[in-house]
Image (spheres, helix red, strand yellow):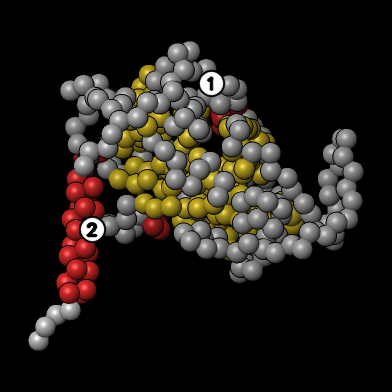
Amino acid sequence: MKIPKIAIAGGAALTLICCWAVAQQKTAEEASWAPKPLTKTVWQAPMKPHTKLADVLAAHKGKSSWRQVIVDDDHLKAEYISMSPGEKVGRRFHPDTREWWVVMAGELRFEIEGQEPFTAVKGSLVQVPMQTIYSMEVVGDKPALRFEVNIAKAHTLYPKSVEPPKVPGLEWIPVTLNRKPMGYNLTNKPHINYYELTKDPAYKGGRFIHDDRAVSNIIYGSEKNLPPVNPKARGHFHPECAEFWIILGGEISYKMEYFGDIIATEGDVVYAPPYTFHAPRFHGDKPSCRLAMNGYTNIAHLFDAVVPH
């Protein structure tokens, strides 16, 4: 049986393409020039290289209801918020942004449009997509502490049946917007729990928030599984956006340009501004975990092209 010449030629072309693809994969990336300001990084308040949860709690000692802004930059805003037993966040939604929370203490009963109500506890990660009505209430006899994140300058709208808060300089007018709850897709889920996930010995983390204006990744592991530290390696930086982390468990070490070494523990927040080299690493004898957050779906990590050994 004769094989048509066209088939032979097509097969040869496919082989060449495959060989080229393999060769491309093995070819080292050509280094690129990237801008790096000569001026030293300055952390703009309220951001700090290392915000310790212990210090935040001490600043509000004796109070059960309070809030403190931790991050407020061009991309994201994050706050620590404590609410008293029985305190509520009434029904509301955000017209254009996704919001998410990490529960650090207490119990919060969430009602999210399209979902069965659930109670979030310590270790819970909860999110609500845009145009989706939600509410929450502290249940039990203890205050609830949460870390709340939204897109910078996000706005809140309220259903017509809810009386909005009085805000100086604003009036509330009835509107329609063809509201459509975005729902959950990709890796987005309304509720997961860090402690439940890490019961699986094979768990290594994963994406929690996947949005066109924000990303949040759960990064979980142990220092014992990492290669030795190269003390001369500076890590990486991001030219377009800051990155910050809340520690979900264990300890994470950071080498932070212009600041030095950081050891962050559960509930602490670490913030790296744009253009600032940083090198996070699992730390200690036990597994540890950080929740990384930034404003880009696939943020570029810029490393030194040549790292001294």
- CA separation, marks 2 and 1? 49 Å
Q: Name the residue under label 1.
A: 43
Crowding at mark 2 (Cα within 10 Å: few <14, some 14-19, many 20+): few
Residue drawn where x is 48% and y is 61% of the image: 186
Disc nearer the start of the sequence (2/1):
2
Across and down, in percent, residue 150 comes to: 61, 44
The residue tagged with tag 2: helix, strand or loop? helix
Amino acid at pointer 1: Trp
Crowding at mark 1 (Cα within 10 Å: few <14, some 14-19, many 20+): few
Depth-wise, is mark 2 or mark 1 nearer the camera? 2
| Labels 2 and 1 touching (C-beta < 8 A) | no
Q: Which of 18 and 55 is in front in this view?
A: 18
144 left or right of 242?
Answer: right
Q: Nearer the viewer, residue 163 or 172?
A: 172
Q: Tell me the quarter of the picture where residue 19 sits.
A: bottom left
Q: Nearer the viewer, residue 168 or 235?
A: 235
Quadrant of image for the C terminus: top left
Q: Mark 2 points at which residue?
A: 17
Q: Tell me the quarter of the picture where residue 233 sits.
A: top left
Query: Is residue 58 in view from this perspective?
Result: no
Quadrant of image for the N terminus: bottom left
Q: Which of 245 and 177 is in front in this view?
A: 177
Residue drawn where x is 17% and y is 74% of the image: 5
Amino acid at pointer 2: Ile
Task: Single out the residue that lies furthest toward the bottom.
Answer: 1
Across and down, in percent, residue 91 comes to: 74, 57
The residue tagged with tag 1: helix, strand or loop? loop
